Amino acid sequence: MHFLGPDPSRFPPIEETDADGIIAVGGDLTPARLEHAYRRGIFPWYSEGLPILWHCPDPRFVLEPSALHVPKSLRKVMNRGTYEVRLDTAFEGVIDGCAKTRRPGQRGTWITRDMRKAYVRLHALGLAHSAEAWLDGVLVGGLYGVSLGRVFYGESMFANADDASKVAFGTLVELMRGWGVALVDCQQETAHLARFGATPWPRQKFTDALVELTAHPTRQGKWSLDDKDTA
């Protein structure tokens, strides 16, 4: 097992990831280390009381925005305007909603206090973003993730109302498609994301794609639904 030192740019080769998808242990959650990790296809995932565990699973579940499929039933909900979708207006509310959501097979949350602080810091730097679904002025669903170059790394989503997170996700991916975003990293396979068109990629294919895609300029700063131009 590899233990990370003080240099935020140093991670072991992805070929040394173990059978559970763990590539390294320890280090910190500074913006510099997180950015270096994401550029390599590595992300932190651990529980309170444990050291930071860095993951790079194989295969990787990925959605190409150009191949986005919005189910007909969801498209009807989106077209009716049941939910108001906003971007980057309640990042902390979204991350807290994700932390409180109970998930099958999980006890507690992997969004620890330190993880929350780290991603709120990335949001302040314009590298982490939220897409939110609002109903009658109340936040009822959404998702958050990290943007680097032409890649969006999805982290988590939650919904307190039917289809709320799906509407936020579908709206965001359609917008990012217009911006030239080429990949959405979904990390782990779920039936929910498969319905949107996400597919498993071999880890090497995914990390090879990151080399080229993260070399593009990053759309940094606050995102808006009114921002229609390409990156």
Image (cartoon, rainbow, N blue to C red):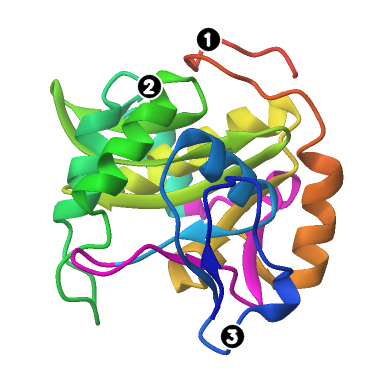
207 up-or-down from 60: above or below: above
Q: Which quadrant would the C terminus be assigned to in this image?
A: top right
In the picture of the structure, the residue carrying the numbered disc 2 is 88
The reply, left or right, for residue 184 in relation to residue 212 is left
Could you say which is closer to the camera, residue 157 or residue 202? 202
Element marked by disc 2: loop
Mark whose residue sits in front, 1 or 2: 2
Where is residue 189 shown, x and y percent of the image?
Answer: 52, 73
Q: Of the two numbered discs 3 and 2 on the same chain, state the one appearing first in sequence.
A: 3
The reply, left or right, for residue 226 in relation to residue 108 is right
Q: Identify the amino acid type marked 1.
A: Asp
Pointers 3 and 2 in contact (CB under 8 A)?
Answer: no
In the picture of the structure, the residue carrying the numbered disc 1 is 226
201 up-or-down from 164: above or below: below
Q: Identify the amino acid type marked 3.
A: Asp
Pointers 1 and 3 in contact (CB under 8 A)?
Answer: no
Q: Identify the amino acid type marked 2.
A: Asp
